Image (cartoon, helix red, strand yellow):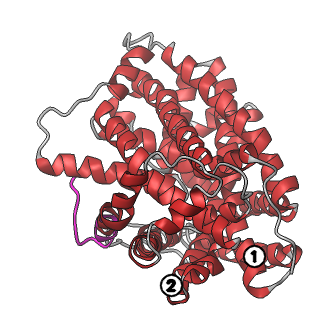
Amino acid sequence: MEKRNKFSGSLGFVLAAAGSAVGLGNIWRFPALAAKNGGGFFLLVYLILAISFGFTLLITEVSIGRKTNQSSLTAYGKINKKFGWIGVISAVVPFLILPYYCIVGGWVLKYAVVFITGQGKKAADGSFFVDFLGDPMWTIIFDLIFLFVTCFFVFRGVNKGIESLSRVLMPALLLIVIGIAIFSLTLKNKDTGVTGLEGLKYYIVPNVDGYTFGDYFRVVMDAMTQLFYSISVAMGIMVTYGSYYKKDDNLVKSVNHIEIFDTIVAFLAGVMIIPAVYVFMGKEGMTGGAGLVFIVIPKVFESMGGFGQILGALFFIMVLFAALTSSVSVLEAVVSGAIDKFNISRKKAVFSEGLIAAVIGAVICLGYYSKSIFYMEVDLPNGSKGQQLLDVFDYLANNIFMPIVAIGTCILIGWVAKPKTVIEEATINGERFGRKGLYKVMITVIAPILLTLILLVSLGVIKLKG
């Protein structure tokens, strides 16, 4: 059995965990949801949920990991043998996510190369992204490059790989985000006179004119699902990272820092993107998902002229950093589980999972090629129409298995092992647990209800308009 490595200290843990939490969802989903859901009102709802719902799920998973000294695959069974099934499902989630996350990371790498080599104008063509997806050879090549880099850092281990990567990339990512956000506010459209500050106003000033109860419910659900996916819970990562966290470090304080870092980056992503899109493309330009990053944003950079080329390169380098720190954490969750459960070496675990992810990734890439047997256009229960194989993997992992894992975790800690299991672990050195009362109510009652609502929306039982 390999000796379990530990993060060198709280900073290493916070940067690694924040690196996992700060991913593509912060950059391409958060700004679009904020723009769609009343701007400042969405931000307020998100913040309230972050310090209650998000905190509850995050501190629970990190505490389970540190208490058991195990990755998620085996940790839940250590708390209660009857709940070992949670660990199994939580291990399936990163296994499903890794192949397609590396594909998207490959897309980001492609665009970073395009802008760095001065060909940003090509990327602004509406057909560029579609043509790229339709060429499986190149999508597979970029996928494999991104996957190889991910495997390299996980192969190096907790300290030399994950922690050292996060210590460099996270500060760099934050600096680039702040720089682009400030520049975004200085923009002005020479033809229309629209400014970046007007875009900022559109982003942060609450606008709930004509909202019905259904609209308010949609905003809460959108904010909650965004937060749920953003903080990397229910996919085995935070339990695994918790198992690398030293017993004498302050767990509560570190979880607070992860929350703050993730929320700040999500907010700044909005400041970075919304004013720029608003200036050059108006409200109509705001869209979510891959379309925002790979179709809309390149057009915005083209509208900026020569400087847009430099800014575009910086932007995609920043997105690449976010994607890489997240993919590393996803792979680590799988690798750590294999080491704990099957007592194999890190080298063998990384190689095996890397090979599997490469094969599955190639199949998913072929799913975009219309002449491939893997090509599909299916409608999903959550209302998404004409989805490809990548979207199906994403739906199963994010919309079905993750809520089930989180609900199971709440039942285990809230009702079976009791909240004291987490509270005692989090305050093992006499630390203050400032939100103890809130935590107990959230883990036993409120969080399970909110998570059940997420699952019902995902299954199409509850339909959100807008």
Residues 29 and 305: in front is 29
Q: Position of residue 197 (x, y in %)?
A: 41, 15
Q: Tell which circle, 1 or 2, labels the residue nearer the N-terminal end.
A: 2
Could you tell whether 321 is left or right of 126 in the image? right
Visible residue check, residue 237:
yes
Q: Position of residue 388 (x, y in %)?
A: 48, 69
**Label 2 amino acid?**
Phe
Could you tell whether 424 is left or right of 412 in the image? right
Quadrant of the drawing holding the N terminus: bottom right
Visible residue check, residue 107:
no
Where is residue 68, by image quadrant?
Answer: bottom right
Q: Secondary structure at mark 1?
A: helix
Residues 106 and 162: in front is 162
Q: Is residue 343 above or below residue 362?
A: below
Badge 2 density bin: few <14, some 14–19, many ≥20, Cα 10 Å? some
Q: Which residue is mark 1?
A: 353
Badge 1 density bin: few <14, some 14–19, many ≥20, Cα 10 Å? some
Q: Which residue: 50% across, 89% down?
A: 82
Residue 281 got which mark? none
Tally the numbered discs: 2
Q: Position of residue 61 (x, y in %)?
A: 55, 64
For the record, the magenta segment spans: 453-466
Q: Which residue is mark 2?
A: 83
**Label 1 amino acid?**
Glu
